[in-house]
Image (spheres, rainbow, N blue to C red):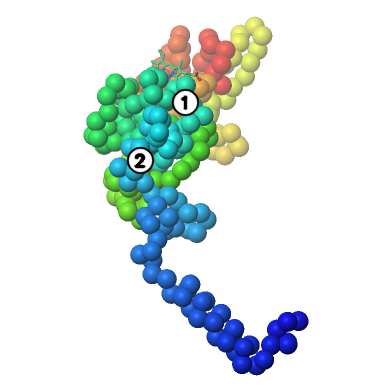
Amino acid sequence: MIFAYLKPYFRHLIVIGLAVLLFVILSREPEDIQPHQQVDRDEEISSDVKLFTDIELEQYNGREGSPGLYLVILGYVYDVASGVKHYGPGEAYNMFVGHDASRSFISGEFEAYHPEMSDVSSLTDGELKSLVKWKSFYDETYVYKGKLIGRYFDDRGRLTDYHKVILERAIKAEQKETEPRQQYPSCNVEWKEETGTRVWCTSRSGDGVERGWVGKPRRYAKEPNPYCVCVPDDVSTSDTSLAPFADCDVSSESCFVMETKTV
Ligand code: HEM
């Protein structure tokens, strides 16, 4: 080993030199790090999340000389270059690139961009849920690039209070929609060639446990396939997603189903 042949004096010098180098590296101030290089605190140390400013992102509009084609939804930035036929200059959805126009995913305003288009607070909870689904679409289809500092993320890439409220409202809508399935027991179902499908309610749940009430079969129609739940008598039928079955008395505990897809 060369090291063994060096005079002790030189060996000490090398060791001290390495120690000084290590000290310099470890004591670098965080100010040296540019905003877009900061490690995302919310997302732990998994990856460096690039943080964009409005001005920086504006350049990613796909026009000649631009560094790329980036779209923003709920403050998340995606590279949509592979969808240039939708988002490129002059294409139908070009308005979405270079800035956050989240509200337009619901309102359908694609003509001209206004900064207020990033404000989604006027949307209903259900619309916010749809917006979050659009965000999932971009996660699945395009390349995630980082976050836009502003309404949805602060300058350290953390969710803003505004963003948290939006997400809570979207989750509330999601829970509301799945509620009847969780809240009410499903009906009994049988199928016979002569009569077709019959749904009915008994005072026992599917696993045979006595629940103390029978309820009426109601068609829960908000899912892709309508679904039958037993709803207690004191529940108002004003919720149109829980409608009585066609050609079946509202007070009946058993109904024949005229459509094929209901279970
Ligand atoms: C709020 C209303 C709407 C929004 C937010 C919207 C948004 C979008 C977006 C973002 C894309 C590109 C998806 C991708 O990256 O692959 C797209 C594609 C498309 N949209 Fe819309 N759209 C809306 C309404 C409509 C309507 C009313 C029509 C039809 C009259 C339509 C027809 C299409 C078609 C044909 C495609 C291309 C599908 C493909 O080639 O893969 N859109 N839409």
Residue closer to the observer: 127 or 237: 127
- The kind of residue on which mark 2 rests is Leu
Residue closer to the observer: 63 or 118: 63
- The kind of residue on which mark 1 rests is Val
Residue 88 pos. (x, y %): 42, 25
Against 240, residue 56 (above or below) is below
Residue closer to the observer: 46 or 226: 46
Ligand 1 positioned in quadrant: top left
Residue 251 pos. (x, y %): 42, 18
In the picture, the quarter occupied by the N terminus is: bottom right
Residue at screen point 33% across, 37% down: 58
Checking the image for residue 162, the label placed there is none
Residue receiving disc 2: 57
Label 1, secondary structure: give it.
helix
Residue at screen point 62% across, 19% down: 190
Quadrant position of residue 244 = top left
Residue receiving disc 1: 84
Mark 2 nearby-residue class (10 Å; few <14, some 14–19, many ≥20): many
Between disc 1 and disc 2, whose residue precedes? 2
The span from disc 1 to disc 2 (Cα, nearest Å) is 17 Å
Residue at screen point 23% across, 34% down: 116
